[in-house]
Amino acid sequence: MDGQTRDFKWIGKRTVRPDGVDKVTGRANFGADFSLPGMLVGKVLRSPHAHARILSIDTGKARVLPGVKAVITAADLPDIPSEEAHFGEDPTDFRYVSHNVMARGKALYDGHVVAAVAATSEAIAEAALGLIEVEYDILPHVLDVEDAMKPDAPLVIEDLITQGITPTPKKPSNIAKRIQYDLGDIAAGFKKADVVIKRRFTTKPVHQGYIEPHAVVASTSEDGQSLVWCSSQGHFMVRASCAKLLGLDVSQLRVMPAEIGGGFGGKVTVYQEPLAVLMSRKTGRPVKMVMSREEVFRGTGPTSGSVMTVKIGATKKGKITAAEATLAFQAGAYPGSPVGLGCMTAFAPYDLENVKTVGYDVVVNRPKATAYRAPGAPLAAFAAESVLDELAKALNIAPLELREKNAAREGTQAPYGPRFGVIGYVATLQALRDHPHYMAPLGPNQGRGIASGFWMNFGGQSSAVINVNEDGTVVVTLGHPDIGGSRASMALMAAEVLGIDITKVRAIIGDTHSIGLSDITGGSKVTFASGMAVVKAANDVTGQLRARAAMIWEVDADGVVWEDGHAVASSTNVGEFEPLSLAQIAAMAAKTGGPISGHASINAKGAGPGFGTHICDVEVDRETGRVTVVRYTAIQDAGRAIHPSYVEGQLQGGAAQGIGWALNEEYVYGDDGRLQNPGFLDYRMPVASDLPMIDTVIVEVPNPNHPFGVRGVGEVPIVPPLAAVANAIEDAIGVRMTDLPMSPPRILAALEDKL
Amino acid sequence: MVLTNELGNQFAGGETKVEVQAKNVRQLIRALEERYPGMGPELEAGMAVAIDGEIYADPFMEPIGPDSEVYFLPRIGGG
Amino acid sequence: MKKSHVTTTINGEPVEFLCEPQQTLLDVLRDELNLTGSKEGCSSGDCGACSVIMDGRVVCTCLALGVEAEGRSIDTIEGMAEGETLHPLQRWFLEEAALQCGFCTPGFLVAAKALLDRNPDPTETEVRYWLAGNLCRCTGYDKIVRAVLSAGAEMRGQ
């Protein structure tokens, strides 16, 4: 297993996923599909103000309403110390997570939870919320990054001192952190440039948009053991967070992973889960909490809005001599925007000597930002790839050629320091050049744009167990929730190593009591890290199978090899033996030492970075400002596509999200700081009639650090589309859009300005 | 061995490129703590390490060669 | 509030239930009848995850009241397969990998079935516009549309 190209029996096959039948028949159980006898319904009370001091909360009337079994406020949650938490983007703090789950003293955004109830029915719970009397002292609020950075801005967190500035500031501000990455000498670099383009960009926060609202059922028995059933991007994360926020031992919680209806980063943290656990502990009854869609918008996610400035300089010949970016991201009410990741990824596809990226993590009175698929990267790429496009036009070089001349390759130093190993960026550019889309003719009011994207991908902790059944079938138990079909890929990898038919492999996700610790499903890590664990566990199994065969044949274990699903004598010197199949050895397991089970718990390292390049054709209706994507091709290096259909699915899904982000999605706030569009009607995500077929090209430059060459694929696809669409619009109507979303009113305004 | 700007500014008087002798990451952190008091806890708590291009999230015992290039980076996540 | 007694037909079987006047048909299906295949995504009729076919029409059950089921014939995702035999649409969704998280899938299957029942040979554009009432965030719709077209072709005997 060395990542080299070979003939595989199962890797690369488009098999039907093991959990598929349940999903097409409605049988699969998602977070809200679970019920227990005696279950109560939990609901939260949310602040209607963007920024307000909570003077008092009177829960007296709510408590005595018949049917109400628990009412909790901040007073019921322990005050936990500051401790760094890693939830998928730049680090945040468990203390902030706790304050986000239930406001302490101040409501920091419209939708911030201030109290919760558990009652015997949803109607009674809602009525109880109406009886809770909260006295607010409304404070001035601040919503936008630039306003929040002004010296006289209202302070969201009153004792927040900017980190990353020397000397440490004496006065608090809304700037939580300043980050900087440098390479070479930026001033000298710009001096060498013949052409320099500098642009300012703004983007609005967008939501991950998963169709399944957050849902949890928590039940606590008399011995203090809590069972939690919820959909999440990490049941071990849920366990750790609930334990931390409630002051419990991790072992007092058992979290069962429900099927999850989308996450994209939005479910790598907790919202209601600690409250459901707490109320189940107080009442002794199960508590179910399901968010409404309005609550999902008002209280969870989103990703950051931003203000960004990018400046790139190049010689006449198209060699980039300097690249500079200043990114200011909205963290929402608590620090932890992905601005650091934005700084690291902005120019990563390019081999540059002189780079400077500066980032500001800024708190504002909006919901706390959460990871959204390659957090920070799509924003930074929107800016950088747009400027590259303008630069190419100014130099009279094709945008593709400009990228080829400056492409990162093996040995290139990334802007954040380390040198790249084997990477496939150039391969994606080559594939683009060869693709018929690239040279296809365009019609009137149509334009074409290309853009590239990068994500470093992640490894992390992962556990897998493979149990061999008496009949030679196997069960693979995994630790990461399956968001997109990963059970299919894990089964393929196990089948490949074991050499058995795919139909003999079942794959399940174990709960926190049943499988070893595994990090979140995110960071494009599951196929990579969990796959590595599965391969290791499968090798553990084949090792045992060989030993059993050796026992049966009465030879030394090193006289037996595993080939094509069978134990085989390694040479005729060992003896003449009929090969033994896995099923045959399994049937004799009891006699040869007991059940056969392989196991692996790893901290996977060596995740290969991923690169993608997209082509987008748009048609602009000059009368309505509506932009339609008429053709789209996503090209990406997957290292090795274990199950090509699901890799294609990631490319298509990420592209669609990026298109929505580019064209229509945004949070609309009133002057009162309240969210005005917390629903799918006015938060406009792409529907089937908005999009064309999305062509995909999977390039394979194997990652030498993975047994099958896998690179994570889930996040890269959302990075290029924002700029690809903007570049296509520029090509179509000659207007450079620098503010997202590029919705019809903005297009029309830009067209008018041009006249 | 390269530190991030913040660490460099905060503890090393602006130096971000440093030469240190160490056989693994844990020794490296101890050596840096000796040279720049206060830096150790920061490094242990929240940073990933890139050694000759490979990124490690929890890197205590990762070996470092005599000529290795080491970068301290924020922990990388995803969504 | 006094509950109403409702008699209806679900997936071809006679069904009776009690519900409060303000309970939606979605709540009734999920909480009273344990038919959790229909999903709640938005409660405002914008995502289609709660779709069923009621008297031949695709309906968002989050916008219908439980009492409206009286005397009607309702087909949910749970009734789409016949015993152990999956409907061609279900098979083609699996074949084409037209689902990732699977949450929107019941709604899409129900809506697609309603389409093919009335228009057995839709164009790609017709499929896209018919399914515009169903939101999917994972797939970008490409494989869903392909699966519906393939199922239609199979059902036409091609």
Image: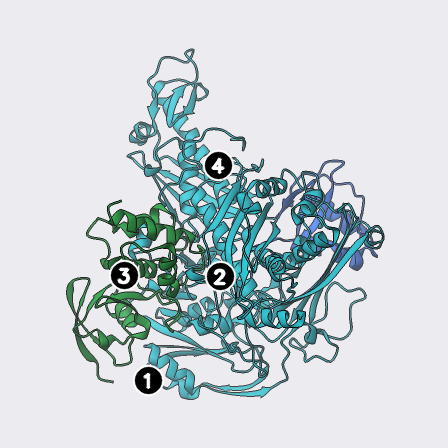
Chain colours: A cyan, B blue, C green
Q: Nearer the viewer, mark 3 or mark 2?
A: 3
Q: CA distance from mark 1 to mark 4?
A: 56 Å
Task: Check if mark 3 and mark 4 are on a common chain.
Answer: no
Q: CA distance from mark 3 to mark 2?
A: 33 Å
Q: Nearer the viewer, residue A483 or C99?
A: C99
Callout count:
4
Task: Check if mark 3 and mark 2 are on a common chain.
Answer: no
Q: Secondary structure at mark 2?
A: loop
Where is mark 3, residue-wise?
Answer: C114
Where is mark 4, residue-wise?
Answer: A536
* Position in image of residue C79 (x %, y %): 22, 58
Q: CA distance from mark 1 to mark 3?
A: 45 Å
Q: Nearer the viewer, mark 2 or mark 1?
A: 2
Q: CA distance from mark 2 to mark 1?
A: 34 Å
* Mark 4 crowdedness (10 Å alpha carbons): few <14, some 14-19, many ≥20: many
Chain assignment, label 3 = C
Query: In the rendered structure, which amino acid carries the disc numbered 4?
Result: Lys
* Position in image of residue A711 (x %, y %): 55, 43
Chain assignment, label 4 = A
Where is mark 1, residue-wise?
Answer: A66
Where is mark 2, residue-wise?
Answer: A267
